[in-house]
Image (cartoon, rainbow, N blue to C red):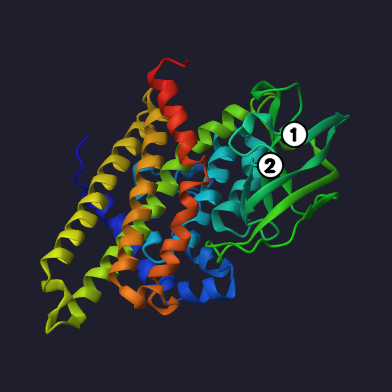
């Protein structure tokens, strides 16, 4: 793959970076402090085509590639990793409907998702089945032309604010083959939400439990056949892992940029901090790590675009490596800011808090190692 960006991709990245600088960065610390979910700002991003980045143009999407998405989410995350990450989740839900929904489902849901007049959340995780997603217990029992849902999803981004919930539920027996995908509207009777969780980071998006108590969902809201939901969920996660890696990368780049500026301004022992070779070496290592992570992320995104057979392994590798590197770089940036890095107004501690969860969600980095090892050992 040629890692140099062509003119179109450079323009896409510049557009997203300008949006981040103008709409996200100036408000990110305030949104974090006030736990404000900036829906109107998300809709401004949608107006620029960022709510359906890889949804087909015939359905109102931008029809771009996964590499384009990586560029966009990285650029957005330089302004606010939290907002960029939520937009990546919305995109994953829209893609699942576009890819696995029928013509009527796409007609019904995609236009609103493309404008973000309707916002979507992804519901896989449960309290008793985080890393072991195939063990989920939320049950959907078919009764005539409806499913009756009972159970609870945990750690759902956007819950309570989102309009549609793409849910993995058990319609059959144990294991992955008993799982189906249902789209559940917010106004479904029997659907409720837990309290907004108090979190270390990601405060600019709500996180709640999604609770089903005899919630009735039409069978026509099922994506594809019964039993296909786990496969759809895993396909969505291949792209989702690249997206969250891109969001980590953008946060790390922002932290690095802040550090370069700070060391150039701050003086100690009669000289600028940037003149101290020990700190120069640390900056050099941070910049190298960010660039290596970016190069591998683009490699994995190109593999997803090419539908390469090793894409699941490469996506897991990218998610594990990039999120670990990005958190390390952000944490180093905080250290190099000294006491000022610990203050909220400088924005570095927020990046550290936001990026920490990226090593956990979309499959923990420990699970990424399991996926990689199984692929290398032929599934053993």
Q: In front: 282, or 113?
A: 282
Label 2 neighbour load within 10 Å: few <14, some 14-19, many 20+: many
Task: Assess whether mark 2 and mark 1 are in contact (beta carbons under 8 angstroms).
Answer: yes
Residue at the farthest front position: 269
Q: Nearer the viewer, residue 339 or 348?
A: 339
The dot on residue 37 is none
Q: Residue at x 51, y 46 (%)?
A: 360
Q: Give residue 263's position: percent from left, percent from top.
A: 21, 74
**Residue 269 as seen in the image, left or right of residue 147:** left
Q: Secondary structure at mark 2?
A: loop
Left/right of residue 334 with respect to residue 185 in the rendered view: left
Kindly tell me whether residue 15 is visible in this rendering: no
The quadrant of the picture occupied by the N terminus is top left
Residue 149, given in percent of the width and then of the height, sits at 81, 39
Judge left or right: residue 240 versus residue 145.
Answer: left
Q: Residue furthest bottom?
A: 270
Q: Quadrant of residue 311?
A: top left
List x then y, in percent, for residue 35: 59, 71
Q: Earlier in the sequence, mark 1 or mark 2?
A: 2
Q: Toward the viewer: 65 or 365?
A: 365
Residue at mark 2? 126
In the depicted structure, whether residue 268 falls above or below residue 327: below
Residue topped by disc 1: 137
The count of marks equals 2
Is the residue 259 above or below the residue 170 in the image?
A: below
Residue ID at (31%, 74%): 338
- Across and down, in percent, residue 67 comes to 34, 43
Hey, which quadrant is residue 281 in on the image? Answer: bottom left
């Amino acid at each position: 793959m040629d890692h140099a960006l062509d003119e179109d991709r450079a323009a896409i990245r510049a557009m997203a970076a300008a949006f981040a600088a103008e709409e996200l960065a100036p408000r990110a610390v305030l949104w974090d402090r006030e736990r404000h979910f900036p829906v109107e700002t998300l809709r401004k991003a949608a107006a620029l085509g960022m709510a359906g980045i890889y949804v087909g143009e015939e359905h109102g999407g931008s029809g771009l590639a996964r590499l384009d998405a990586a560029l966009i989410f990285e650029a957005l995350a330089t302004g606010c990793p939290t907002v960029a990450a939520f937009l990546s989740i919305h995109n994953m839900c829209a893609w699942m409907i576009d890819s696995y929904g029928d013509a009527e489902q796409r007609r019904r849901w995609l236009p609103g998702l493309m404008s973000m007049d309707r916002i979507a959340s992804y519901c896989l995780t449960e309290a008793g089945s985080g890393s072991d997603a195939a063990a989920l217990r939320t049950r959907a029992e078919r009764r005539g032309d409806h499913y009756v849902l009972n159970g609870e999803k945990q750690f759902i981004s956007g819950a309570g604010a989102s309009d549609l919930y793409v849910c993995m539920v058990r319609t059959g027996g144990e294991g992955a083959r008993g799982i189906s995908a249902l789209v559940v509207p917010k106004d479904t009777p029997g659907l409720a939400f837990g309290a907004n969780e108090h979190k270390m980071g990601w405060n600019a998006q709500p996180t709640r439990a999604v609770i089903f108590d005899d919630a009735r969902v039409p069978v026509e809201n099922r994506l594809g056949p019964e039993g296909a939901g786990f496969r759809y969920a895993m396909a969505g996660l291949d792209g989702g892992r690249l997206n969250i890696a891109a969001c980590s990368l953008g946060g790390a780049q922002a932290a690095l940029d802040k550090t370069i500026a700070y060391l150039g301004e701050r003086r100690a022992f009669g000289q600028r901090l940037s003149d101290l070779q020990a700190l120069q070496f640390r900056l050099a290592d941070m910049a190298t790590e960010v660039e290596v992570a970016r190069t591998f992320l683009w490699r994995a995104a190109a593999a997803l675009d090419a539908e390469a057979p090793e894409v699941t392994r490469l996506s897991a590798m990218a998610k594990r490596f990039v999120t670990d590197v990005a958190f390390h770089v952000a944490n180093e940036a905080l250290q190099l800011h000294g006491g000022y890095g610990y203050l909220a107004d400088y924005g570095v501690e927020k990046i550290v808090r936001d990026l920490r969860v990226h090593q956990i969600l979309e499959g923990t980095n420990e699970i990424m190692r399991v996926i990689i090892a199984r692929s290398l050992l032929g599934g053993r």
